[in-house]
Image (spheres, rainbow, N blue to C red):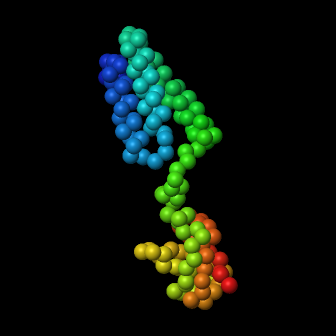
Amino acid sequence: MADLIGQWNHWHWWILAVLFVVLEVFTPGTFFLFMGISAAVIGGVVLIVPGMGWEYQVLGFAVLAVVATVLGRSYLKRRPIHTDRPTLNRRGAQYIGRTFSLDEPIVNGQGKIRVDDSTWKISGSDCAAGSRVKVTGVDGTVLQVEVIR
């Protein structure tokens, strides 16, 4: 393995950077983007210093990946990405504020409700079938509802 990595040049690092960016496209979050940036930077360093030992290349990549990830996440935490559809991948959150009529009663604080083309578990005050409820929140896959009087 060390012999294989020892033969790497700048092109190998840049190909690795492209692979990380492609992985980033298919995964949620921004983890692989920072690793791709780190691999691209190491590729640039190897281009400038072609005789750099593989140990230093791997060490530099590891350090840069950690630093880039910490700095990148810190930046994104301070400046979150705003979107015109913030509930796109949070399906339950899309129902907050909507009202529904219960097909089945809520018993012991638990029940089910039909929302569009699916059935959701709900929690709220006990009430009879036919009552109107309003979705007030989401706890995992359970919609929190309150009875509309």
Instruction: Pick whichever, 86 or 37, lies toward us.
Output: 86
Which quadrant of the figure contains the N terminus? top left
Q: What residue is rendered at 50% in x and 30% in y?
A: 65
Q: What residue is rendered at 39% in x and 36% in y?
A: 21
From the top left corner, tell me how far across and down residue 93 is, in percent.
55, 64
Which quadrant of the figure contains the C terminus? bottom right
Could you tell whether 54 is left or right of 121 in the image? left
Find residue 122 and report its image quarter: bottom right
Pick out the residue farthest to the front. 84
Instruction: Pick whichever, 50 or 1, lies toward us.
Output: 50
Instruction: Pick whichever, 144 or 134, lies toward us.
Output: 134
From the top left corner, tell me how far across and down residue 86 is, in percent.
53, 55
Find residue 75 and report its image quarter: top right
Q: Is residue 34 above or below residue 127?
A: above
Could you tell whether 76 is left or right of 50 in the image? right
Q: Is residue 12 above or below residue 28?
A: above
Q: What residue is rendered at 41% in x and 10% in y?
A: 49
Q: What residue is rendered at 45% in x and 75% in y?
A: 116
From the top left corner, tell me how far across and down residue 112 is, in percent.
53, 79
Instruction: Pick whichever, 34 or 58, lies toward us.
Output: 34
Does the image show residue 58?
no
Could you tell whether 145 is left or right of 57 in the image? right
Does the image show residue 136?
yes
